[in-house]
Amino acid sequence: MKDIDKRDIKNIFLPYYKNKKILITGGTGLIGRELVNFLLMCKTKSIKIVSLDKINHKNKNVKFIFGDLCNFNLCKKITKDIDIVFHLAGVKGSVKVTIEKPSSFLVPLLMMNTNILEASRVNKVKR
């Protein structure tokens, strides 16, 4: 597989994401913040990020939503009229807590994943 170079970004990615309405769950995390910056470069129509972290993006074209993805009604609301969902949200915690209380991570992750996938299906999100 060949490496992606700047021509690929300009010719493939920029046109694909241009004018799309995008939702990023976990948009305040390490990967989410970088994805937001990349999508802003692609001139997307709108970007919404949802997170339990109160880290607001400085760009006025990014709408921040504080919310818990374990709430299915919230997931239906935020996926309405969205073209693409990037589901990056997770549960934070130490390795020790993960080992000692695995269900404290597994259950919320399953709920978030199920809710986002089903809300996206209900709202006919393309990707």
Image (cartoon, rainbow, N blue to C red):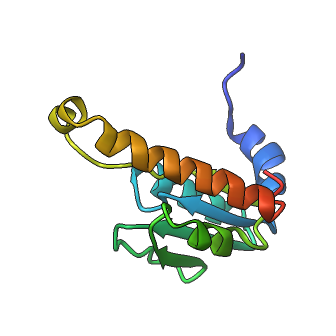
* For residue 77, above or below residue 84: below
Q: Who's the residue at 74% across and 72% down the image? A: 80
Q: Is residue 88 visible?
A: no
* For residue 10, above or below residue 43: above
| Nearer-the-camera pick, 25 or 11 | 25
* For residue 71, above or below residue 14: below
Q: Who's the residue at 77% across and 54% down the image? A: 14
In the image: residue 35, left or right of residue 9: left
The quadrant of the rendering that contains the N terminus is top right
Q: Who's the residue at 25% across and 35% down the image? A: 98
Can you name the residue that lies furthest to the bottom here?
60
In the image: residue 76, left or right of residue 107: right
- Please tell me in which quadrant of the rendered image residue 79 appears: bottom right
Q: Is residue 40 visible?
A: yes
Residue 101: x and y in percent read 22, 37
Residue 4: x and y in percent read 68, 31
Residue 46: x and y in percent read 69, 74
In the image: residue 26, left or right of residue 119: left
In the image: residue 109, left or right of residue 3: left
- Please tell me in which quadrant of the rendered image residue 6 appears: top right
| Nearer-the-camera pick, 90 or 20 | 90
| Nearer-the-camera pick, 107 or 94 | 107
Q: How many marks?
A: 0
Q: Who's the residue at 56% across and 48% down the image? A: 113
Residue 124: x and y in percent read 84, 60
* For residue 43, above or below residue 34: below
- Please tell me in which quadrant of the rendered image residue 29 appears: bottom left
